[in-house]
Amino acid sequence: MKRLLFLALTSLFLSLPLFAQQEEDTENGVVSLAGREGYAIQTKSGDFVFKPYMMVQTAGHYNWYDDEGLDKAYNQDNIMNSGFSIPYAIIGFTGKAFDKVSFNLSINASASGARILQQAWFDVRLNRAMALRTGKFKTPFQNGFLTTLGNTLMPCVPSSMTTTVIMPYVLNAVTPSIMTGWDIGVELHGLLGDKFGYEVGLWNGTGSSTNAATKTVSDDWHIPSLLYAGRLSYMPLGLMPSTQGDPNRLNDNKILLAASGSINVESESESTNDTRAGLEAAWLYRRLYLSAEAYYMHIGFTDRQKIDDTFDYWGAYAQCGYFLTDRFQAALRYDFMDRNGMDADGFLNMPAVGFNCFFSSCNLKLQAMYQYIGRTGHKTQLDRDNDDLGLATHSATIQLQYSF
């Protein structure tokens, strides 16, 4: 049954018309270079362009945790994981050659291990309707993640995207989250009429934590144990910019509708097969930005694990941003997650409020947000206590970002 599901999904993606979504003004995925002269090296004919960029974020955090999960005998405090951080310190370059090849490389100096190499890819455009990208880049899943990193509505993406799920088994690796993130692979994409988009490809399925080839062949399905993923989008009013708030785009009217799906074959140290699906909607209308999406993950154990149980999880959020002035944007978000699985009662409510202040003359952006995590509908108090382990009940973040 699982193999038939994989074949059906693969056939669907490969049989669709070759449409694509390519962000021409935010191709590096970190900061938008649209309308910025900055510093660039290029030939007189424009056949070769080389443009460096950087982004540094410094943030202050306050996180307050409930008593459950804390051991007072070890003087564990309710206030933890607070203080100052550098979420991203990115330096990179992007460019194009002979109007056929575009490239991007970025290093995140605030990360460690293989994650220091945040992105490294090149893109070969066969024509406007078809291009091939290979390297380390964003997997085609979740609009909140695919948004340009420096242009998000709040300094922290929805918790339902990044929070690990809960299951009653100890795996050989970290329990997964719904988000697939950065990964190494190859992707086919293109563009038709500035309205339809597609991305379909293969990735290692190991995320950004390794830059090596570590995968094998599936014991259950007898296919390469990789991440098979694709995304389809429709933009009836033209290409949707990958931003959730930009003071230079206060006259736009763009709409995005998208669907995505993936199968991570024998992920998590060959212990599970993870199937994901998502729906997205976004509207950028002058000073207003609205978006909502929902995503689902099914986890099934491999035969060698000898576990018949399967688990289903889902999350969703809706958010709104509005420019009260040309430089000040207010933000609201409601985030939801069924973290303990659809077979168990209870879920997490995670409302958040924030604001953004843009200093466009010097490329500074100040962001602030507050989030509360509530718990609803659990069958027992123990279930309620376990559902938010590791998550702060009250959290506040102030972040200052500089980019060029």
Image: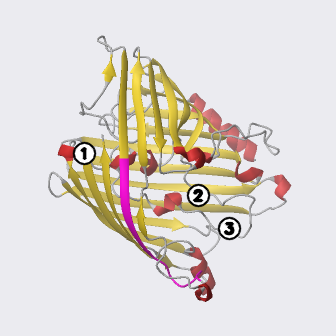
Q: Quadrant of residue 172?
A: bottom right
Looking at the rendered structure, the kind of residue marked 1 is: Asn
51 w.r.t. 363: above or below: above
Tag 1: Cα neighbours inside 10 Å, few (<14), some, or many (≥20)?
Answer: few
Residue 162 picture location, percent across and down: 52, 58
Kind of residue indicated by mark 3:
Met
User: Which image quadrant is residue 21 in?
Assistant: top left
The kind of residue on which mark 2 rests is Ser
Disc marking residue 167: 3
> Residue 195 in the image: x percent, y percent?
36, 32
- Disc 3, SS: loop
User: Looking at the image, which is closer to me, 58 or 24?
Assistant: 58
Q: How packed is label 2: few (under 14 Cα within 10 Å), some, or many (20 or more)?
A: some
Q: Is residue 126 left or right of residue 310?
A: left
- The residue under label 2 is 177
Highlighted range, magenta: 56-70
> Residue tagged by mark 1?
363
Residue beneath the point at 65% across and 70% down: 343
Please name the residue shown 61% across and 70% down the image.
340
- Quarter of the rendering occupied by the C terminus: top left
**Residue drawn at the location 44% of the way across and 39% of the way down:** 233
Res. 250 visible in picture: no
Q: Give neighbour class at mark 3: few <14, some 14-19, many 20+ (Cα, 10 Å).
A: some
